[in-house]
Image (tube, rainbow, N blue to C red):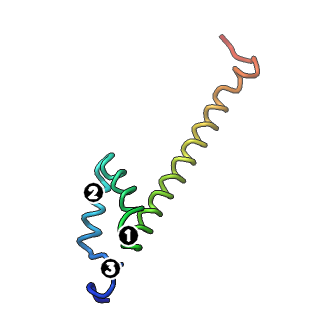
Amino acid sequence: MSESNDRNYVSTMSWFGMMFVTAIPLVGFVMMIVWAFTGDNETRKNYFRALLLWMLVGMVLAAGFFLICLALGTLPFVLGHAHA
């Protein structure tokens, strides 16, 4: 694959740099959004869109787990069987 002929080519050092930036809290998240929706490189945009989708899946699963734990932990209080 020739770097000059393929506008979707991303070098190893570019991936390394992008991964380094995404490891920085808050800055990495903002850059993930920027890289997911701007620029001409479709490979980079698709990769960061996929990462954002995985983050969304993780947040939904975490919220569901929290709500289930909350519901199971407070069920006796809701039913009036709480012991003081």
Number of the front mark, 2 or 3: 3
Q: Residue 44: which numbered mark, if any?
A: 1
Q: Choose top left, top right, bottom left or bottom right for residue 23.
A: bottom left
Tell me residue 62's x, y (percent).
54, 44
**CB contact under 8 Å: marks 2 and 3:** no
Tell me residue 50's x, y (percent).
47, 63
Q: Choose top left, top right, bottom left or bottom right for residue 35.
A: bottom left
Question: Extreme top residue here?
Answer: 84
* Screen quadrant of the N terminus: bottom left
Mark 2 neighbour class, 10 Å CA radius: few under 14, some 14 to 19, many 20 or more:
some
Q: Choose top left, top right, bottom left or bottom right for residue 63.
A: top right
Identity of the residue drawn at 30% across and 49% down: 27
**CB contact under 8 Å: marks 1 and 3:** no
Identity of the residue drawn at 30% across and 62% down: 19
Which of pointers 1 and 3 lies earlier in the amino acid sequence? 3
Residue 63 higher or lower than 56, as above or below: above
Tell me residue 18's x, y (percent).
29, 63
What is the spatial separation of the Cα atoms under label 1 and label 3, in whole angstroms?
Answer: 9 Å
Q: Residue beneath label 2, please?
A: 21
Mark 1 neighbour class, 10 Å CA radius: few under 14, some 14 to 19, many 20 or more:
many
Which of pointers 2 and 3 lies earlier in the amino acid sequence? 3
Q: Residue beneath label 3, please?
A: 9
Q: Residue 32: which numbered mark, if any?
A: none
What is the spatial separation of the Cα atoms under label 1 and label 2, in whole angstroms?
Answer: 14 Å
In the image, 17 versus 65, the foreground residue is: 17
Which of pointers 1 and 2 lies earlier in the amino acid sequence? 2
| Element at label 1 | helix
Kind of residue sitting beneath label 3: Tyr
Kind of residue sitting beneath label 1: Arg
